[in-house]
Amino acid sequence: MSVDVPLLTTETAHLPNKPPRNRGRGFGWAMTVPTLVAMGIVVAFPLFFALYVSVHDYDLTEGGIGDFTGWANYAKTLSTELLQIAAKNTAIYSASVVVLELIVALGLSLLLNQPNLRFKNIYLSILLIPLLVSPIAVGLIWRLLLHPDLGAVNWLLTTLGLPPQEWLAGLHTAMMTVIGVDVWHETSLMIVVILAGLTALPRDPIEASMVDGASSWQTFRSVTLPMLTPVLLVAVLIRLIAAMKTYDLIYILTRGGPGTATETVSYTIWKSAFTSLEMGRAAAASFLLLAVILVLVIILVRFLQDENA
Amino acid sequence: MEPTVLRQPANRRRVLQASAATAFALAMGGRALRAMAQGVELSREYEGTTLNLLMEDLLETTAIEDMLPEFTEATGINVNFEKVNYGVMHEKLVPQLAAGEGNGSYDVLEVDFYWINEFARSGWMTKLDELIAGSNGALNLDNYIPATLKIGSEVDGSVFYIPMYPYPMGLIYRTDLVDNADFAAAYKGVAGKDLALPTSVEEYVAMATAVSQSGQDIYGAAMQAQQVDPIVMEFCNFLYGAGGDYYNAEMTEPIINQELGVKIAQLYADCVNNAAQPGAAGADLNDTMATYMQGKAFSMISYLFMLNAFNDSEDSQVKGMNALTVMPGGTGLTGLWSWGIPVSSPNPGAAGEFLKWVESPDIVMRRALAGGVAAQKAPYENPEYIEKYPWMSQALDLIETGKGLPAVTKQASLVEIMGRYLSECVSGAKSAQEAMDGAAAELKDLL
């Protein structure tokens, strides 16, 4: 392997005799500080303010930020039955959508990655349409389609001789329906990530395995999948974080109902903040959610590092 | 926090405006800085001020918007309406209201009836007693239907709001089916008695169930049992119609889990599950409206303004076939929009002038004739109004007999709690007793 070594040119030769490392460090700081300041304002300040609020009694109807309460907001949040139900629902929802979207997106990406596939761009464009629609619009569209009495989905079922369903109104169907709508909406994102990964894979090992007589399945399982694993982990990471924060789809489709069947942590936090106006408890619940997401991210990143190693 | 009395902050802009107004007066040869508009004396002291109002996108809002040039001509005050969907109003308002005195963006608010206590007791709204007393009769609470004052004007003995637009609920039903002999006969075959308007909640549920079971391809009731707001608004009619309430009269204990509350919760769940359209447990007002307008339901406990949509809309397949009556049992829910001036208003003086103008008898009458629902009594005594909108005579009954929500500070939380537990009852996740016990435990924390 050859290494290109930069040559000392006449332009650099007459520069002051200053250690290059220090000069580079100063330039680096000059470039970084504005970004750090901006990040501090838009990320760190709200985060620390929320942390401050979470350990104080702060109910908007009672004026400004009240007394320091320590971990009381956290303890009260954790002991609330509604949040426990919401945490369970969020876990079911997040795991379901990530797994289903991964399977569907991987399958579609493999199909789209076929070298001889015609009209590939047309298929890709169609598959990407849901990604371009806002979650609120997706929710409204699906509410209409799933209307038990007037919706197209039940019309289709009854036309086929099947019984109509109470998609969003049933205690046992509401969560599955919301998961289905999320899969319809968000699989596109996974396709983009996975297809990019597949396209970037080196062709040599795949072709070599085929020359050696491996079947398509063996090639996929033993060559493509191991090489693609880091990309899949990134895709899972992105979707898992987003799924755990899902609020908009729940708000439009079910408002957490029926009962608490589709109540998620983010929706509960929104209600604490904007219905009950209990900012302290909402901030505490937000930090608990953040902590869980951070743990999952750390686990996945470690896994990713192991894969890369 | 002590609510702030209406006053004019002495800031630089105000001083400049006052100086400009004084100069204008001198230039006009000492002509008084007051103008008469719609029979109300208005001040030109705030000429050049721009008022920002957050409004729900209603017919009433559009009617007022069309008249705004008259207000600007009389006072020199410009008015901007920011019209938003109801769903985002509360979360948009709260940060503005909490901004502190004079620091908000909105000068006048449209406040829904279940935010009135929360906003007033949080010290976010201006007391209007002085404005009313100094309005030379332009703002006269005696002109209003008493129920509207109780629902959306007074908080803890002080006036914080001026009633603007009531939206009472009642029983809407199909008159063509009531008069249809085949329909009546099929109903009698199931119910064992003649079809007649119910006089109690129990009778209504029995009637709606019998209609659904009469094999006529029509649902007895179009219902909206989606949590949070739709189910609670509908349930209130069942509860109030049966003489029940959420708390005792002294507001010291929830009574929703007592015998009557549990019975009504069960009746409501039965009605959703046995008499309403499929999926009613997840339906909101739009879903229910679609079901009824397509002629698929016999009745609907709903808002007065829905009658207008059913009878007049080109999209309605039941056009002109509907009537409205008070909730069986005699009492239903009356919702109400009220005007209020937030403490955070940068222009409270000009905001007061706006309230005097918009609630003046002439403007109120014109708003009503444009299709609005009046909170004042006078339009209902105007033959032209009743002739143009015949159902409005019935509307007066609904408003007069209607009730709002209990006077807890966090009424929005009450709606959230009840919505969640009622939905659990309807979906079968909890029995009526379990659901109402759970609701009562959380409602107690709101006292």
Image: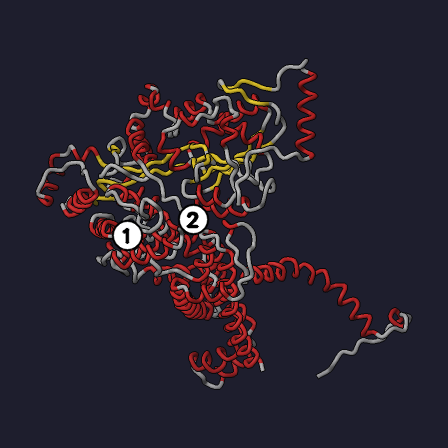
The answer to whether residue B419 is left or right of residue A3 is left
The answer to whether residue B440 is left or right of residue B63 is left
- The image shows residue B364, relative to residue A130, as above or below, that is above
From the viewer's side, name the closer residue of B258 and A161. B258
The residue at 62%/19% (across/down) is B33
Residue B279 pos. (x, y %): 28, 52
- The image shows residue B432, relative to residue B127, as above or below, that is below
The answer to whether residue A274 is left or right of residue B9 is left
- The image shows residue A163, relative to residue A202, as above or below, that is above
Q: Residues within 10 Å of mark 1 (few under 14, many from 20)?
A: many
Find numbered disc 2 in the image and state the secondary structure of the residue it sits on. loop
From the viewer's side, name the closer residue of A264 and A216. A264
Amino acid type indicated by mark 1? Gly
Asked if labels 1 and 2 share a chain, the reply is: yes
Q: Tell me which chain the residue with mark 1 is part of.
A: B
User: Which residue appears farthest toward the top when viewing the image?
Assistant: B29
The residue at 18%/36% (across/down) is B197
In space, the residues marked 1 and 2 are separated at their CA atoms by 30 Å
Residue B11 visible (yes or no): yes
Find numbered disc 1 in the image and state the secondary structure of the residue it sits on. loop
Q: Which colour scheme is used?
A: secondary structure
The answer to whether residue A263 is left or right of residue B101 is left
Residue A93 visible (yes or no): no
The residue at 43%/59% (across/down) is A268
Q: Tell me which chain the residue with mark 2 is part of.
A: B
Residue B279's disc is 1
Residue B410's disc is 2
Disc on the earlier residue, 1 or 2: 1
Q: Quadrant of residue A161?
A: bottom left
Amino acid type indicated by mark 2? Lys
Residue B281 pos. (x, y %): 29, 52
Residue A222's disc is none
